[in-house]
Image: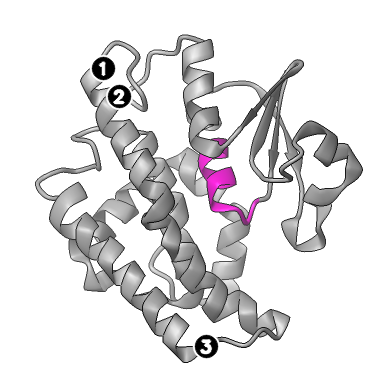
Amino acid sequence: MIKLYIDWISQPSRAVKAVLDILKVPHEVKALKIQFDEHKSPEFTAIHPLQQLPVLQDGDFIVAESHNIMRYIIKQRNISTNLYPLTDIRQQTRIDQYLDYHHTNTRRCLHLYHSVLISPIKGEKVIPEVLEKEKQDVAKVFSYFENNWLKGRNYICGDQVTLADISACSEMMQLDMIKFDFQNYPITNAWLNRVIRIPEVYQAHNVAFKIIKKQNPSSQFLK
């Protein structure tokens, strides 16, 4: 059985976990906690020297990077799925286009989350100008979703949910821990509600929701 190394607080980890569950791929979860440096242990470093999560271990084959893991599972097992259709090169290209965009755009949500929630806990100084820039970066991402990715569509790449949606949803949900006002972006907010309500996606966020319940008890996403 394949092993999936994740941190439940890690956005990419949650995305991969949700995809494996949707595809009903048997796997064993090996949960590590980045905050306690468990990803830096000699045992895990031997598996992935970059000490990053998530990582998938398929026998003696190691697969890193969340988007790469998702595609590997679908291709290696020849799974027919709208998440990443193997027979539709144009839809694959649309999905890949978003996944490439994600790293330097949607992923910026992490910086704002870190400055607002994590830095104060760690006693790190937050520079006001940097915080303002992070807020502007996130606003640009959400505006682009409103006016481009989701314009006239139910999901990022059309009328069906794909890897793009699950990755983006997992990233944006981190902002719910800092009481981000998603309702300023009604199209994106409605899409986010559609994606997070997918049972496997919601389940993958169970640990995150415990933090959200503490930090943002009035969250629209809490059941």
- Which is nearer the eye, 179 or 141? 141
The label number, if any, that marks residue 127 in the structure image = 3
Kind of element beneath mark 2: helix
Q: Residue at x 64, y 41 (%)?
A: 54
- Which is nearer the eye, 114 or 13? 114
Magenta stretch: dominant SS? helix
- Which is nearer the eye, 182 or 194? 182
All told, the count of numbered labels is 3
Res 223 visible:
no
The stretch in magenta equals: 8-18
The label number, if any, that marks residue 89 in the structure image = 1
Q: How is the image coloured?
A: one colour
- Density class for disc 3 (Cα within 10 Å; few <14, some 14-19, many ≥20) is few
Q: Residue at x 25, y 15 (%)?
A: 88
Give the residue type at disc 3. Ile
Query: Horizontal and vertical percent for residue 129?
Result: 43, 87
Mark toward the viewer: 1 or 3: 3
The label number, if any, that marks residue 78 in the structure image = none
Q: Residue at x 65, y 51 (%)?
A: 8
Q: Residue at x 52, y 21 (%)?
A: 72
Distance between the Cα atoms at labels 1 and 3? 45 Å
Mark toward the viewer: 2 or 3: 3
- Which is nearer the eye, 134 or 143? 134
- In the rendered structure, the answer to whether residue 8 lies left or right of residue 77 reads right
Reading the chain from its start, which is encountered first: label 2 or label 3? 2
Reading the chain from its start, which is encountered first: label 1 or label 3? 1
The label number, if any, that marks residue 92 in the structure image = 2
**Picture quadrant where residue 58 is located:** top right
C-beta proximity under 8 Å, tags 2 and 1: yes
